[in-house]
Amino acid sequence: MLISEREVVLCTLRQLAILFAFGLAGELVSYISPVQTPASVIAPLLMLVAFLFKWIKPEHVEEVTQFFYAHMALLFIAPAVGVMRNLDLVRHALLPLVLICVLATIVTFLTAFLSVSFVRILTGRKGGPQ
């Protein structure tokens, strides 16, 4: 069965709408929450809850998220150029910034490893992908 161009566009728009809805919900929760937490942290957590309770399925956002993942490097060009253009302003803090980036990378890797290990224990999976 061939999918028309219109159906592809509608599917993409639906997937984008789901992502934007979670982003907006994250902004709303961040705004009304007494604890200062960035919406960029709250939105993925809300999406995780929706996945866990099967309110949405990964297939509902798969194509758009794969596109964003494949083109993620483009999102970092503008901030990198901004830092390079204002290097004289951040030169005095360059060493602490590099150390923070290295430490944050290590913490992120460890957190991801421990999270995956924990989920594997919960689901009873062992070894590689199944």
Image (spheres, rainbow, N blue to C red):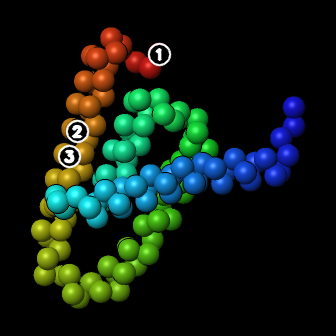
- Is residue 40 visible to the viewer in this orientation of the structure? no
How would you rate the neighbour count of disc 3 (Cα within 10 Å): few for under 14, some for 14-19, many for 20 or more? few
Which label is found at residue 130? Answer: 1
Q: Residue at x 50, y 57 (%)?
A: 20
Question: x, y percentage for residue 115?
Answer: 26, 31
Q: Quick check: 54 above or below 84?
A: above
**Front residue of 122 and 75:** 122
Q: Which amino acid does label 3 sit on?
A: Ile
Question: x, y percentage for residue 121?
Answer: 27, 16
In front: label 1 or label 3:
1
Which residue in the protein does label 2 denote?
Answer: 111
**Front residue of 36 and 111:** 36
Sequence-wise first label, 1 or 3? 3
Q: Which residue is drawn at 50% across and 65% down?
A: 74
**CA separation in Å, label 1 and label 3:** 27 Å
Q: Residue at x 87, y 31 (%)?
A: 1
Q: Which residue is drawn at 36% across and 56% down?
A: 26
Q: What residue type is labelled 1?
A: Gln
